[in-house]
Image (cartoon, rainbow, N blue to C red):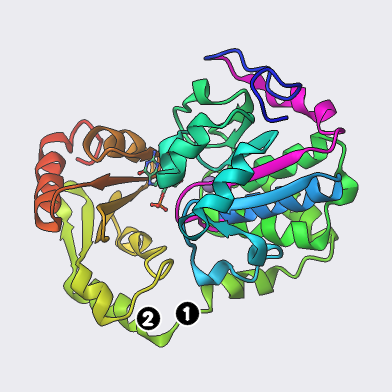
Amino acid sequence: MGRKGSYFSLHLPGFMLPIHHIYPKLATPANVIITTHQKPDPDALGSSLALSQVLLALGHSVTVISPTNWAAFLDWMPGAEAVLNFEITREKSASLINAADWIFCLDFNTLSRTKNLAPVLEQATAAKVLIDHHQQPAVESFAYGISDITKSSTCEMIYDFIIEGGWENLLTVDVAACLYAGLIGDTGSFRFPAASANVHKMAAHLKETGLKHTKVHEHIYDNFMESRLRFIGFVLTSRMEVYYEYNTALIYISKNDLLRYDIKTGDTEGLVNYPLSIGGIKMAAICIDRDEERKWSFRSKGNVDVNTFARRFFEGGGHFNAAGGRSSASLEETVKTFKKVLKENASEFQLI
Ligand code: 5GP
Ligand code: MN
């Protein structure tokens, strides 16, 4: 199986069939790959591991492949120990992908978000299934799927998938812990607008499985090294600029800063939110000098559309109030570009 035109991959090019088409098909045991975006966050890894546990219980052979490594604060997730990091298992991962019947693509909507894994996914003949909540999906890449930007998180969508598929009995406490992690990650622990009544009802249902929610918060937010907290102090003192005339703040971090404080994957997550705690600040941006690129994150409040900002100026995208992007220019150059486009477009982006 896993060949074009197989039972699973009725793919009309350019057309994505609704997700409910796959529920009956999943009654037949198959080879399943689940993948997500590079440097997976709690929502990306949580949704992947929750789905993996449910599909395993349904009798499928399931492998979760991450395009890259992930933050150590996610290692507690049930099933994390079996996740393949594509960067260090290229051949094994590629052969599993080529033998797959289904490839579930979670928490991203354009194959380029999987970095070096993208060409392998591109040529795979398995039926690709999209489950995602970002803006502007590249639907032509997927045979089946659901893209819903009103959803708080991909974990909320996996929860819906489990319930609508009729598998509520498979919602174990381990599945609940993975889903809860993504839910708090993407809603800022229930404070962002996407934390709807349904999100709170879902959280109540997760609690009914016996979920210890305090443990999940501790794993994700209270499990860092001292050096990371000192790094945050340094960054807020010496690497943050506030432009009150544009209601915007910028943080930039050099390679040397990362080395000096021994900063690892995941240690910079959430840093971009700090400037938004300054009264009046509507947009916060952070630029980090990574080996291969300069990585941008943007956060905003209210009607400031950082998805469009990231898409237009920094080769990125994401959500209306949370987006990311990249640049090949040096840190100094890309920061200069940021200040220029901020000045020129502040009014269009409702910053002034
Ligand atoms: P973060 O700033 O936490 O990395 O990402 C914020 C949101 O934007 C996430 O939902 C993430 O998936 C998305 N995002 C981050 N970087 C990129 C990017 O380079 N391209 C696109 N399209 N989305 C991104
Ligand atoms: Mn997400």
Question: Is 235 left, or right, of 38 in this rendering?
Answer: left
Q: Can the viewer see residue 337?
A: yes
Mark 1 residue crowding within 10 angstroms, few (<14) / some (14–19) / many (20+): some
Mark 2 vs mark 1: in front: 1
Q: Which residues are magenta?
A: 15-42
Q: Position of residue 71 (x, y in %)?
A: 49, 67
Identify which residue, 87 or 315, lies in the foreground: 87
Question: Is 48 left, or right, of 343 in this rendering?
Answer: right
Identify which residue, 96 or 352, lies in the foreground: 96
Q: Position of residue 316 (x, y in %)?
A: 32, 39
Question: Image height check: is 131 above or below 327?
Answer: above
| Quadrant location of the N terminus in the rendered image | top right
Task: Specify which label sits upstream in the sequence, 2 or 1.
Answer: 1
**Residue type highlighted by circle 2:** Leu
User: Decide: marks 2, 1 in contact (CB < 8 A)?
Assistant: yes
**Residue type highlighted by circle 1:** Phe
**Secondary element at tag 2:** helix
Identify which residue, 82 or 258, lies in the foreground: 82
Residue 34 colored in magenta in the image:
yes
At 49% from the left and 31% from the top, the residue drawn is 122
Question: Image height check: is 129 above or below 314?
Answer: above
Question: Is 52 left, or right, of 272 in this rendering?
Answer: right
At 77% from the left and 47% from the top, the residue drawn is 61
**Secondary element at tag 1:** loop
At 63% from the left and 17% from the top, the residue drawn is 11
| Quadrant location of the C terminus in the rendered image | top left
Question: Image height check: is 145 above or below 133?
Answer: above
The dot on residue 229 is 2
Q: Can the viewer see residue 281?
A: no
- Residue labelled with disc 1: 224
